[in-house]
Image (spheres, rainbow, N blue to C red):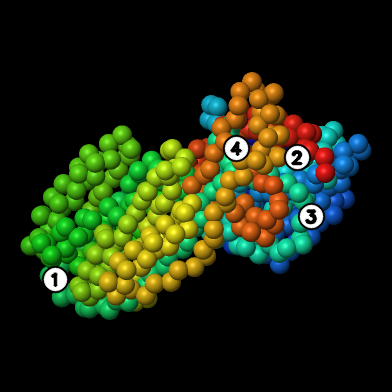
Amino acid sequence: MEKEIQKLTPEAIWKHFAEICNIPRPSHHEEKIRAYLIAFAEAHNLEHTVDAGNNVIIRKPAVKGMEDRKTVVLQAHVDMVPQKNSDKTFDFTRDAIEPYVDGEWVTANGTTLGADNGIGVSAILAVLESKTLKHGNIEALFTATEETGMDGAFGLKAGELKGDILLNLDSETEGELYVGCAGGLDLNATIKYETIPLEKGKFVGYQLEVKGLKGGHSGMEIILQRANANKLLARFLKNVQEKLGIILCSIDGGGLRNAIPREAFATVAVLKNSERMFRNAVKKFEKIFINEFKGVEDNISFKAIPAKCPSSAINFFDQCNLIDAVVGCPNGVIRMSTSMPGLVETSTNLARVVSERGKFQIQCLLRSSVNSAKEDLALTMRTVFELAGAKVKLSGGYDGWNPNMDSPILKTMSEGYESLFGKTPAVMAIHAGLECGIIGGVYPEMDMISFGPTICYPHSPDEKVNIASVEKFWKYLCHTLETVPVK
């Protein structure tokens, strides 16, 4: 598989991507990719540092005749989202990603591919390695732990970088230039619960399973109105818990804060005399879910699997608090932008619901390009959870990146794209969070733009990158570096 990837064009990018796929790099486990980058810099006699935010910075001097150009910061994040199919045995901290060519795409066997942002990292390495590319001074900024909180960007200090222009290589549609992004905010709610013993012989055990959803990036794909596994599971429980005497024993739904939940599971105890009605209710709601999300979700599965009945369960009052909070919690698109048609302004993703050690932990990620709207949504959600007896913590807030339509690098890149490909690139803002917003807060005078190849279904095992778009992306990046304005 690795040799197959390395033969793709442009080889300068794909050979590095194939190597990166062999390096485990889920968020918070980035030591090996940092070591790889440092070794690369040393092998190519390039100046390099690791800053307080665990970001790797590598510098390459201008080639002869390009010394008068503005310094360009090439930026990508080194971590990837560790998502896999439930039937895939895989350890993201130890195992190598298994990429393969599938027609016009590169994808991975049962896991996220890591093209987000591995292609960006690979492109920067190709620039640093090139002996023929014309460019001015280059600062390569490889940021840490972007996917779970943009830790590296938040850790970046003033004075670390000298660049005039920042090219963020973390966008996911070729032919689009991004000049703005949404801000974000994490909401974590905790609800305490007590357990009670179950009367032996009175109940039967089942595992409820919501599976087969598409999931995806909670910024990029939230507009597609995909189902949220946590919401579906809670909706079912709300409808049947009192009627059928269902007692919740445990729950585990969703995964990462920025991934739309694809799966959710709950172990429940069902009164024996209600067992038949319970099974029929599960079948009924599976049909309801399939019908409601027809054309959006193709493989929704909602099943009740017989399981050993636990000896204890969650107090019914505490169970109701959790279910009410999850059912009542806003989720998905809240408001569309009035200034840019087709752009989501405000959204929220109910990412994680889990029971552990006497506490329900609920995690949501809020996004908005309007700070006041983000704050209002946080107030609404906080109120819902507090009514259910939860303690709520808001953290990790960051502002959006305001577009500068008079940007010199935007003008250069727009003209460059038209000269290369015969059409004008789309200039857009993105609902996802980009590190540009945070970096721009530290370096307000830096001219910034974000672009990249076409990557579909990031943050899910269906992630894939279009091969032809990577070739165009590389050609465009090289042209941009060659035509960077003079200082």
- In the rendered structure, find residue 177 and report the number of the disc placed on it: 4
Above or below — where is 200 with respect to 142? below
The location of residue 15, given as percent across then percent down, is 71, 38
Q: Is residue 214 left or right of residue 400?
A: left
User: Of the residues shown, which amino acid type is indicated by label 2?
Assistant: Ala
Q: Which residue is mark 3?
A: 162
Q: Secondary structure at mark 2?
A: helix
Quadrant (top left/top right/bottom left/bottom right) for the N terminus: top right
Q: Secondary structure at mark 3?
A: loop
The location of residue 108, given as percent across then percent down, is 53, 40
Quadrant (top left/top right/bottom left/bottom right) for the C terminus: top right
In space, the residues marked 4 and 1 are separated at their CA atoms by: 63 Å
Q: Residue at x 7, y 62 (%)?
A: 273
Looking at the picture, tell me which residue is in the foreground, 99 or 316. Answer: 316
Mark 1 crowdedness (10 Å alpha carbons): few <14, some 14-19, many ≥20: few
Q: Is residue 104 left or right of residue 203?
A: right
Q: Which residue is mark 2?
A: 126
Mark 4 and mark 1 residues within 8 Å of each other at the beta carbon: no
User: Of the residues shown, which amino acid type is indicated by label 3?
Assistant: Lys
The image quadrant of residue 455 is: top right
Residue furthest to the top: 422
User: Of the residues shown, which amino acid type is indicated by label 1?
Assistant: Gly
Task: Give the label, 1 or 2, closer to the camera.
Answer: 2
Q: Is residue 116 left or right of residue 302?
A: right
Q: Secondary structure at mark 1?
A: loop
Mark 3 or mark 2, which is nearer the start of the sequence?
A: 2
Q: Which residue is mark 1?
A: 201
User: Of the residues shown, which amino acid type is indicated by label 4?
Assistant: Leu
